[in-house]
Each structure stands twice: as C-alpha cells, then as structure tokens.
Amino acid sequence: MTDTNKIILAEDDNDMRRFLVKALQNAGYEVVSFDNGMSAYHRLREEPFELLLTDIVMPEMDGIELARRASELDPDIKIMFITGFAAVALNPDSQTPKDAKVLSKPFHLRDLVNEVQKMLAA
C-alpha cells in the first residue's frame, strides 16, 4: 500500500477532465483518467484504486454501470459521481452503490478535493 491514494477518473469532457486531474494531483493524489467508462473499467480490472471518480452521463458505459462493476471488482472501492444530473444518481432504482457520493456540477475544485479527502480518510 503506497502513501499516495490512487484515483481513477472517468469524464468525457476533456476540459473538465484536465481540470480535475490537475486539482487532484495538486492535492497530492495519483490520478489515472479516461474519457469513457469502458476504458476506465478495463483499467480497474488491472490494478486496484482507492477511489473511482466518474461522470454519470458518458458514451460506451455510463458512470452508474461503471460504479456497479467497479464495486463488484472491489467492494472496498470508494465511489464519487460528478454530474449535472444529481436526480439521476439519487434515483433509488438506478442501482448505484449505496455509499456513493454525488457532487453536482458546477462545483468548486476545493469542494471536490475536500470531499475526496473526506472519503479517503473514512
């Protein structure tokens, strides 16, 4: 177990993705990012991550499906959704993992980093 928490990020908006990666790296995290859920899922099968940070609406595999599969691979993985559609994530029928956190866009990077720190410290 390294000191650096590894975060996997799936976000199909390029600017948003770069923005998030930079903020998390500046906060001291190691971040691997993908622009779709399928690629992120393949990476999750190769190595463990502490936290999955994912957009909900994405091509190929949406964030909810990705989160479900991620928690099947690793029941301990922490999950945070970033979305402009909070209602989707919070729908009880959507099979989102129960401890998942939802951060609604727009949000401040400091809020994101704070939430990530809280989740990883838990």
Image (cartoon, rainbow, N blue to C red):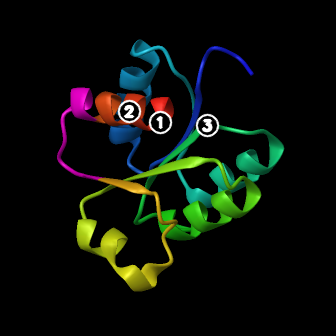
Q: Residue at x 66, y 57 (%)?
A: 70
How far, Cα to Cα, is label 2 from label 3? 13 Å
Question: What residue is shown at x 57% (from left), y 70% (from top)?
Answer: 65
Q: CA distance from mark 2 to mark 1?
A: 6 Å
- Foreground residue, 84 or 5? 5
Tag in front: 1 or 3:
1
Can the viewer see residue 18 in this picture?
Answer: no
Q: Nearer the viewer, mark 2 or mark 1?
A: 1
Give the SS element for disc 1.
loop
The kind of residue tagged 1 is Ala
How far across and how far down the image is residue 13, in percent?
38, 48
Instruction: Identify the residue under disc 2.
Output: 118
Q: Are marks 2 and 1 in contact (CB under 8 Å)?
A: yes
Q: Residues within 10 Å of mark 2 (few under 14, many from 20)?
A: few
Residue farthest bottom in this picture: 93
**Please, is residue 29 above or below residue 38 in the view?**
above
Answer with mark 2 or mark 3, whichever residue precedes in sequence: 3
User: Among all residues in the image, which is located at the extreme right?
Assistant: 46
Looking at the image, tell me whether mark 1 or mark 3 is earlier in sequence order: 3
Type of amino acid under label 2: Lys
Residue numbers of the magenta segment: 103-111
Find disc 1 in the rendering and name its residue. 122
Residue 33 against residue 24 in the figure, above or below: below
Query: Any mark on residue 50, and which?
Result: 3
